[in-house]
Image: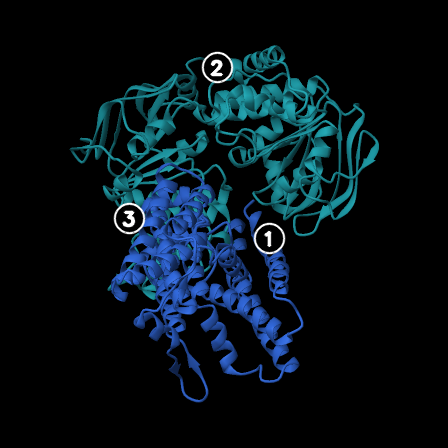
Chain colours: A cyan, B blue
C-alpha cells in the first residue's frame, strides 16, 4: 500500500528562545486521513512545534510545506485561512458569546454587511448535529461545561474547511464518556480525509485513536513510528530516553492510619457546591479523592483551605476548632493548596523561577522582613535539585518553562512553607509520564516524612497508587470512604463512583 | 454519558444577560411613577423628552464609552475632548469659518485623537487608563492654549440649531440635538448587534486572547472603539456647543465619570464583554431623571444629584458582582 502524499511537511525546524533551544532540526509530516500523535515529555518541544506551525511563533530555521507549497504563517489567522485549525488545551473561545457565535464569529453569514442571526443559528445547529451534539445554540457558551465548550471549539475548527486539525491535549479535562464522544467525532473527521495532529498525555488514548506517532525529546526528533508497531514500554523509553522501570517503582505504601488526626471535618458543607461531608485526615496519610469531573472534588479542597466559606459544619485542625475565613488563615495554620488551574491561580508568568518560589514564604513572613539573598539561593537551589526542575536556572522566567516544570515550581513554592497538610488538585494533569512519576514519588516521600496529603486526580490508577484511603464523590456528595487495601482496584472504584453506594 | 446528557437539562428562564438592563428599566419606571405621584405636572411625556434634550451630549458620549467598556477598556479623555470641541468650534466660528466646515473639522480631530490613543494602547500594550488619562490632560491643556476665557458663539447656523424645536404633535417637542443623539444610539445599536465590528467588540471584551486565537482582528477592533469614542466625544462637544452656545475650557469637567456611571448603571460590565446599548440609554435617562426630580423638589441643592448617583453606582456595582460571581465558578 503506497502511502498518500503528505499534506503537511515540516523539515529541519529550529526555534530558539532566550537561553533555551526549543526545537533543533525537527522533521514532521502529516498524511491526509490519519490521526498522528505528537509525543514527548514536557519541554520536549511539542507545544513549540505546534505554535511554530500555526504562526504563533516565527521559525528560526527550516521550512513548512502545505500541500506541496512552501508556507510561512504570520498569525493563527493566516494558518486558519490556509486550512490549519487548532483546538488548544484551554478552550480558547469567548464564554460571554452564544454557542452559535463562537462557531461562526469572524465568518458570520451576512447580507449587505448585516449579520443573519437566524441563518447562523440554523447552520450552527446543523454542524453540531453532525457531531451528535444537541445544544441550545443561542445560550451563552459559559452555561455549558468545559467538555461541551471543547466540542464547540472543534465544531468551529472543523467548519473552517480544515485540512489539518490540531488537537492540543483536548482530553485532559474530559471524563470517559466525553472522551469516547470526542473520539467518535475524530474518527468521522478522519473518514472525511482531514489530517489530525493529536497531543495527549494519556497513553491509552493515544493507542486507541492514533495511527502514527512522532516522538520528540529535548527539542530534537527521536523518530516517527506506526502506532501498531511500537509498544507502550518502547514508546516511553523513547520519550524519556531511559527505561521506565526505575521511575515506575514506588515502594509499598506503609500504613499510616496510626498518625494523629490533623484535619477533622464534621458535616462541613456549602450549598450548591458540596453536600455536608465528614472527613478525617491523619498526619503522614495520603487521602485520595476520586470522582467524575464536577463531582465536588475541588469544592472539598476549597472548603478545607478556606477559599470558600463553609455554610454548615465544623472544622478542626490539630484538634483545635477553627473557622477558616480566608486562605491566609489556612496558610498560617500550615495548610497548602496547589490548585488545578496553575496558570490562572498560581504562578506569575513574568517573574523568575526564584521569585515564584519564594513568593509564598515571603508573603507569610510579611513584606517588611525580606528574605536574605543567600537564604533565597539556598532554598531555590535545594528545591530545583529536589524536584528536578528544568532548566535548572533560577533566573529563567516562569512562562518559558514547560507545563510539568511550572507545576513543580508551584509545588516547591508550597513545600518551602513546610506545610502540615498539602492539598494537591490534579497536580499531574497535562504533564508527561516522567514528571508525573517524579511528582508521585515526591508525594510518597512527603507523607513518609509525616506530612498529610489530600490528593485529587481524575486518574484512578494514580489515586490508588498513592493513597492510603480514598474518598469517592458523586454528584457533589462524599458517598464512600474506602481503605486502600488489596481488595480495592480501579474497577471497584469505578463501580462505587457509578453506583454511588456505600460499600 | 451521564456527563453530557446531565449537563443539557438547564433551566430556561429570562436569560441572565438581560437582568441588569431590566433592573435599570424597572428603576427608571419606578422613579417616573414616584415623581408623578409626588409632583404635579411631572408625569408627562415632555419630562422624558426634556431629559433627552438636556442630556443629548451625555448620551452621545456614553454611546462611545459603551463601545470602549465592552472591550474591557476605559476612556477618561471624553470630557476633555468635549471641552476641546466646544473651544475649537467657538474660536473657529469667531474667526469666520463656515459652520459646517467647523463641524466636520471638529469631528475629524476627535476621531483622530481617539485613533491615536487606541493605537498607543494596542501597539505599546499600555493600560487604557493611563493612556486616556494622558489624553485627558492633553485635550484639556489644548483648550487653554486657545483661550482661558469663555468664548460666546453667535454664528447663525449654531444659534438656529440651538433654538429650534421639532414638534412631535400634541404639546411635545424635542431639540435637533436630541434627535441627533437618538440617531447615534440607533446606528450604534445596529453596529453592535448586526455587524462584525460589533460582535468583535463583544468577543474582544470576553477574552482578548481567545479572540486573537480565533483569528479576529483584535488590533483593528481595539483601535476602532477608541476612534468611535473620540468621534462621539467630539460630536457630544458639538451638541454641548449648541446647548450652551459658548466654548469654555472648563466645561464638561468630570463628564467622563458621568458617562462611565451611565454605562455601568445601564448594566454593562466594566470587565467587558457583556452589556447593551439600550442599557446605556436607560442609564443616561436615570441620571437625567434624578436631576429632574431634584429640581422639582426645589429645596434640595444640586449636589444631591451626585449623592444619588454615587449610591446608585454602589448598588449597581454590587449587583454586577452578584451576577458575575454567580457565573465565575461555573466550570469545574
Q: Is residue B241 above or below residue A405?
A: below
Determine whether the residue tagged by mark 2 lies in a helix, strand or loop.
loop
- Residue pointed to by mark 1: B321
* Horizontal and vertical percent position of residue B250: 47, 55
Q: Nearer the viewer, mark 1 or mark 2?
A: 1
Q: Which mark is residue A393?
A: 2
Q: CA distance from mark 2 to mark 3?
A: 42 Å
* Horizontal and vertical percent position of residue B104: 27, 60
Tell whether label 3 touches label 1 (CB within 8 Å). Answer: no
Could you confirm whether marks 2 and 3 are on the same chain?
yes
> Label 2 crowding class (10 Å Cα cut-off): few <14, some 14-19, many 20+?
some
* Horizontal and vertical percent position of residue A318: 81, 29
Image point 37% across, 51% down: which residue?
A: B226
> Label 1 crowding class (10 Å Cα cut-off): few <14, some 14-19, many 20+?
some
Determine whether the residue tagged by mark 1 lies in a helix, strand or loop.
helix
Could you confirm whether marks 1 and 3 are on the same chain?
no
Determine whether the residue tagged by mark 3 lies in a helix, strand or loop.
loop
Image point 39% across, 71% down: which residue?
A: B177
Instruction: Kindly tell me whether residue A212 is visible in this rendering.
Output: no
Amino acid at each position: 500500500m503506497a502511502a498518500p502524499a503528505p499534506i503537511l511537511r515540516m523539515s529541519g525546524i529550529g526555534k530558539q528562545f532566550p537561553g533555551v533551544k526549543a526545537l533543533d532540526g525537527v522533521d514532521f509530516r502529516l498524511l491526509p486521513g490519519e490521526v498522528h500523535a505528537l509525543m514527548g515529555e514536557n519541554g520536549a518541544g511539542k507545544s513549540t512545534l505546534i505554535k511554530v506551525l500555526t504562526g504563533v511563533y516565527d521559525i528560526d530555521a527550516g521550512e513548512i510545506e502545505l500541500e506541496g507549497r512552501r508556507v510561512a504563517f504570520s498569525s493563527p489567522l493566516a494558518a486558519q485561512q490556509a486550512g490549519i485549525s487548532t483546538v488548544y488545551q484551554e478552550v480558547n473561545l469567548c464564554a460571554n458569546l452564544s454557542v452559535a457565535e463562537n462557531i461562526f464569529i469572524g465568518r458570520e453569514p451576512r447580507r449587505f454587511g448585516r449579520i443573519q442571526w437566524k441563518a447562523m443559528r440554523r447552520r450552527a445547529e446543523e454542524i453540531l448535529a453532525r457531531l451528535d451534539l444537541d445544544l441550545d445554540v443561542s445560550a451563552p457558551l459559559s452555561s455549558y461545561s468545559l467538555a461541551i465548550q471543547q466540542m464547540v471549539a472543534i465544531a468551529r475548527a472543523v467548519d473552517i474547511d480544515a485540512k489539518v486539525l490540531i488537537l492540543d491535549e483536548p482530553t485532559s479535562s474530559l471524563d470517559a464518556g466525553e472522551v469516547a464522544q470526542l473520539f467518535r467525532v475524530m474518527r468521522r473527521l478522519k473518514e472525511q480525509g482531514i489530517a489530525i495532529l493529536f497531543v495527549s498525555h494519556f497513553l491509552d488514548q493515544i493507542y486507541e485513536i492514533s495511527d502514527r506517532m512522532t516522538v520528540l525529546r529535548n527539542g530534537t526528533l527521536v523518530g516517527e513510528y506506526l502506532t501498531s508497531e511500537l509498544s507502550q514500554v518502547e514508546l516511553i523509553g523513547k520519550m524519556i530516553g531511559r527505561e521506565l522501570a526505575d521511575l515506575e517503582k514506588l515502594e509499598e505504601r506503609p500504613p499510616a492510619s496510626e498518625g494523629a488526626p490533623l484535619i477533622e471535618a464534621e458535616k462541613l458543607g456549602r450549598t450548591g457546591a458540596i453536600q455536608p461531608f465528614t472527613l478525617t485526615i491523619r498526619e503522614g496519610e495520603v487521602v485520595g479523592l476520586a470522582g467524575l469531573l464536577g463531582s465536588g472534588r475541588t469544592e472539598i479542597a476549597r472548603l478545607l483551605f478556606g477559599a470558600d466559606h463553609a455554610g454548615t459544619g465544623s472544622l478542626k485542625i490539630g484538634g483545635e476548632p477553627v473557622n477558616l475565613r480566608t486562605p491566609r488563615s489556612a496558610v498560617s495554620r500550615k495548610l497548602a493548596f496547589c490548585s488545578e488551574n496553575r496558570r490562572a491561580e498560581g504562578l506569575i508568568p513574568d517573574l523568575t523561577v526564584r521569585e515564584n518560589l519564594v513568593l509564598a514564604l515571603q508573603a507569610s513572613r510579611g513584606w517588611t522582613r525580606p528574605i536574605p539573598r543567600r537564604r533565597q539561593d539556598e532554598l531555590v537551589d535545594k528545591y530545583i535539585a529536589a524536584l528536578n526542575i528544568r532548566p535548572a536556572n533560577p533566573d529563567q522566567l516562569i512562562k518559558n518553562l514547560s507545563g510539568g516544570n511550572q507545576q513543580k515550581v508551584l509545588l516547591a513554592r508550597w513545600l518551602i512553607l513546610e506545610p502540615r497538610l498539602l492539598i494537591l488538585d490534579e497536580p499531574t494533569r497535562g504533564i508527561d509520564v516522567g514528571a508525573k512519576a517524579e511528582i508521585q514519588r515526591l508525594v510518597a516521600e512527603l507523607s513518609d516524612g509525616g506530612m498529610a496529603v489530600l490528593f485529587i486526580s481524575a486518574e484512578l490508577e494514580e489515586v490508588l497508587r498513592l493513597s492510603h484511603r480514598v474518598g469517592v464523590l458523586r454528584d457533589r456528595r462524599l458517598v464512600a470512604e474506602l481503605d486502600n487495601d488489596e481488595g480495592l482496584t480501579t474497577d471497584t472504584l469505578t463501580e462505587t463512583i457509578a453506583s454511588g453506594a456505600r460499600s | 454519558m451521564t456527563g453530557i446528557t446531565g449537563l443539557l437539562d438547564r433551566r430556561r428562564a429570562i436569560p441572565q444577560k438581560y437582568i441588569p438592563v431590566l433592573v435599570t428599566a424597572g428603576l427608571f419606571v419606578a422613579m417616573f411613577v414616584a415623581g408623578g405621584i409626588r409632583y404635579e405636572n411631572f408625569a408627562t411625556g415632555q419630562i422624558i423628552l426634556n431629559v433627552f434634550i438636556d442630556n443629548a451630549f451625555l448620551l452621545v458620549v456614553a454611546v462611545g464609552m459603551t463601545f470602549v467598556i465592552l472591550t474591557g477598556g476605559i476612556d477618561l479623555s471624553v470630557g476633555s475632548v468635549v471641552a476641546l470641541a466646544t473651544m475649537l468650534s467657538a474660536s473657529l466660528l469667531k474667526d469666520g469659518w463656515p459652520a459646517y466646515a467647523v463641524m466636520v473639522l471638529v469631528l475629524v480631530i476627535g476621531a483622530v485623537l481617539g485613533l491615536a490613543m487606541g493605537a498607543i494602547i494596542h501597539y505599546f500594550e499600555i493600560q487604557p487608563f493611563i493612556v486616556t488619562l494622558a489624553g485627558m490632560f492633553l485635550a484639556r491643556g489644548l483648550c487653554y492654549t486657545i483661550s482661558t476665557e469663555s468664548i460666546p458663539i453667535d454664528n447663525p447656523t449654531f444659534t438656529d440649531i440651538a433654538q429650534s424645536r421639532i414638534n412631535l404633535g400634541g404639546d411635545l417637542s424635542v431639540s435637533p440635538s436630541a434627535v441627533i443623539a437618538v440617531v447615534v444610539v440607533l446606528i450604534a445599536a445596529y453596529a453592535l448587534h448586526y455587524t462584525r465590528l460589533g460582535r468583535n467588540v463583544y468577543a474582544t471584551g470576553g477574552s482578548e486572547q481567545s479572540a486573537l486565537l480565533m483569528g479576529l482582528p483584535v488590533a483593528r477592533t481595539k483601535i476602532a472603539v477608541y476612534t468611535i469614542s473620540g468621534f462621539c466625544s467630539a460630536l457630544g462637544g458639538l451638541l454641548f456647543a449648541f446647548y450652551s452656545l459658548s466654548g469654555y475650557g472648563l466645561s464638561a469637567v468630570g463628564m467622563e465619570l458621568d458617562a462611565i456611571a451611565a454605562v455601568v448603571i445601564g448594566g454593562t460590565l466594566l470587565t467587558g464583554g457583556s452589556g447593551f446599548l439600550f442599557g446605556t440609554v436607560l442609564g443616561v435617562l436615570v441620571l437625567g431623571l434624578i436631576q429632574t426630580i431634584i429640581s422639582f423638589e426645589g429645596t434640595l441643592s444640586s449636589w444631591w444629584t451626585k449623592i444619588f448617583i454615587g449610591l446608585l453606582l454602589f448598588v449597581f456595582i454590587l449587583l454586577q458582582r452578584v451576577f458575575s460571581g454567580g457565573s465565575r465558578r461555573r466550570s469545574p
